[in-house]
Amino acid sequence: MTADVEIIPPHSHASEPRIHVAERAPGWFGAVLALLTVAAAFGVGAFFLVGRTLGASLLVWLTWPLVFSPQFTSWVFGAERIVFWKILVVFLVVDIIARLFLRRDLWPRR
């Protein structure tokens, strides 16, 4: 943001000069850049939070059809093809449960 400062000479009835500051806002382009920056920061934070789970889910999603038959997949997931978000939710729940029960230093017992 830039500002142009102009000192206005005093009027006959005023004893001190006045200062006028004209601000120029960044406009819609600056607002779009700010929103993209916020979205990128949110994306990086989310990736650091669930990146390992996301990678494991992607690996299982890619290798599942090579290992298991469509009949077994339809028995487990209700469809012949596996859906990525279902695997991601399962891995997120398993990760949360593992973190709660395997890390005893989260809530130390007295």
Image (cartoon, rainbow, N blue to C red):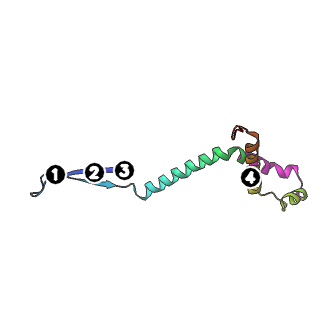
Residue 67, x across and y down, in percent? 87, 49
Residue 33, x across and y down, in percent? 48, 53
Which disc number belongs to residue 2? none
Q: Residues within 10 Å of mark 4 (few under 14, many from 20)?
A: many
User: Quarter-wise, where is residue 80 in the image?
Assistant: bottom right
Kind of residue at disc 4: Leu
Which numbered mark, 1 or 4, is in the foreground of this view? 1
Kind of residue at disc 3: Met
Q: Principal SS element in the magenta part?
A: helix
- Give whichever of discs 1 and 4 has the lower sequence position: 1
Measured in 3D between alpha carbons, the distance from the residue under mark 2 to the one under mark 3, in whole angstroms, is 10 Å
Measured in 3D between alpha carbons, the distance from the residue under mark 4 to the one under mark 3, in whole angstroms, is 42 Å
| Residue ID for mark 4 | 88
At a point 14% along the width and 51% down the height, the residue shown is 16
Measured in 3D between alpha carbons, the distance from the residue under mark 1 to the one under mark 4, in whole angstroms, is 66 Å
Which disc number belongs to residue 4? 2
Question: Which element is circle 2 on?
Answer: strand
- Give whichever of discs 3 and 1 has the lower sequence position: 3
Kind of residue at disc 2: Asp
Task: State yes or no: residue 57 in magenta.
Answer: yes
Question: Which element is circle 3 on?
Answer: loop
Measured in 3D between alpha carbons, the distance from the residue under mark 3 to the one under mark 1, in whole angstroms, is 25 Å
Placement of the C terminus among the 4 image quadrants: top right
Residue 8, x across and y down, in percent? 17, 53
Residue 66, x across and y down, in percent? 85, 50
Kind of residue at disc 1: Pro
| Residue ID for mark 3 | 1
At a point 37% along the width and 55% down the height, the residue shown is 25
Residue extent of the magenta highlight: 54-70
